[in-house]
């Protein structure tokens, strides 16, 4: 007996086609909050993510469960946003972990990372976790920063509602990658860097709210044995939040 085929991602050639699809499946109040509630993104953000292959949308019935559970799941979550995330656990010479404390967004919002998070990046089609980690370092920490990639762990999957797109259920495939600093970044205290890889806010679509992007990242080093043990323990939670 042949195994079932993986669910086919949904395709949206235009922003209007995506809006029509979601409008018939998600609560109007949830969609209205996209790009207006603090920390959320816009419909154009999601359309660009889909166009660049950084995520896919699949029907919940096809995505998940045995036939006996599909009807109930489809009613609860009619569509699922699936994302692969590289979570880069960078350590300095004394073994402290680099964690992001917040982000400055293009709309002027300062988004705080409640539990902190390691450097994280949505993966692109055909990209390995290690390649995504190298790109994340270049885009979020800067061109002059060098790290040594040490390896990774087996991916794990988590599901929850997206913070950036309220009302849209999300499936996160988390790929942890370990690395150590070689040069180019302060190895003590707190610092900030300019985002170098997000330019979606420059895309203009008539009648559509502009995409919201990250402009600056705020970082600090966290020791495993200091008062921030809970922050280190929450690294995987933060990595998932970064993909929201």
Image (spheres, grey):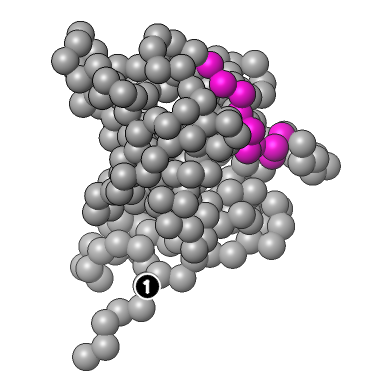
All told, the count of numbered labels is 1
Q: Residue at x 67, y 57 (%)?
A: 17
> From which residue to which does the magenta span run?
192-201
Horizontally, is 46 left or right of 76 in the view? right
Q: Compared with residue 146, is residue 6 higher up or lower down, i.e. above or below?
A: below
Quarter of the image for the N terminus: give it: bottom left
Q: Does the magenta run of residues contain 129?
A: no
| Circle 1 SS class | loop
Give residue 81's position: percent from left, percent from top: 45, 51
Give residue 44's position: percent from left, percent from top: 66, 43
For this rendering, which residue is in front, 172 or 162? 172
Q: Residue at x 35, y 34 (%)?
A: 180
Give residue 16's position: percent from left, percent from top: 71, 53
Horizontally, is 1 left or right of 179 in the view? left
Circle 1 Cα neighbour tier, 10 Å, few/some/many (<14 / 14–19 / ≥20): few
For this rendering, which residue is in front, 140 or 204? 140
Is any atom of residue 21 visible in this view? yes
Give residue 70's position: percent from left, percent from top: 29, 64
**Residue pointed to by mark 1:** 6
Q: Compared with residue 28, is residue 127 higher up or lower down, i.e. above or below?
A: below
Q: Quadrant of residue 233?
A: top left
For this rendering, which residue is in front, 159 or 238? 238
Q: Residue at x 26, y 24 (%)?
A: 95
Is any atom of residue 27 visible in this view? no
The residue at the far bottom in this view is 1
Quarter of the image for the C terminus: give it: top left
Horizontally, is 125 left or right of 199 in the view? left
Q: Quadrant of residue 196?
A: top right
The residue at the far left in this view is 225
Q: Does the magenta run of residues contain 199?
A: yes
């Amino acid at each position: 007996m042949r195994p079932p085929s993986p669910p086919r991602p949904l395709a949206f050639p235009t922003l209007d086609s995506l809006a029509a699809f979601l409008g018939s499946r998600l609560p109007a109040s949830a969609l209205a909050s996209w790009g207006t509630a603090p920390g959320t993104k816009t419909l154009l953000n999601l359309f660009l993510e889909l166009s660049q292959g950084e995520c896919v949308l699949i029907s919940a019935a096809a995505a998940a469960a045995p036939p006996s559970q599909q009807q109930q799941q489809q009613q609860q979550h009619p569509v699922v946003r699936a994302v692969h995330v590289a979570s880069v656990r960078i350590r300095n010479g004394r073994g402290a972990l680099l964690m992001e404390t917040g982000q400055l967004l293009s709309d002027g919002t300062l988004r705080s990372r409640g539990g902190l998070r390691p450097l994280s990046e949505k993966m692109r089609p055909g990209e390995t976790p290690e390649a995504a980690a190298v790109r994340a370092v270049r885009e979020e920490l800067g061109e002059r920063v060098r790290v040594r990639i040490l390896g990774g762990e087996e991916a794990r999957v988590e599901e929850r509602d997206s913070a950036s797109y309220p009302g849209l259920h999300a499936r996160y495939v988390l790929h942890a990658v370990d690395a150590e600093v070689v040069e180019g970044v302060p190895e003590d205290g707190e610092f900030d860097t300019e985002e170098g890889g997000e330019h979606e806010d420059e895309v203009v679509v008539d009648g559509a709210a502009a995409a919201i992007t990250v402009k600056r990242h705020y970082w600090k080093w966290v020791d495993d044995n200091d008062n921030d043990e809970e922050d280190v323990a929450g690294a995987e939670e933060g990595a998932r939040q970064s993909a929201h």
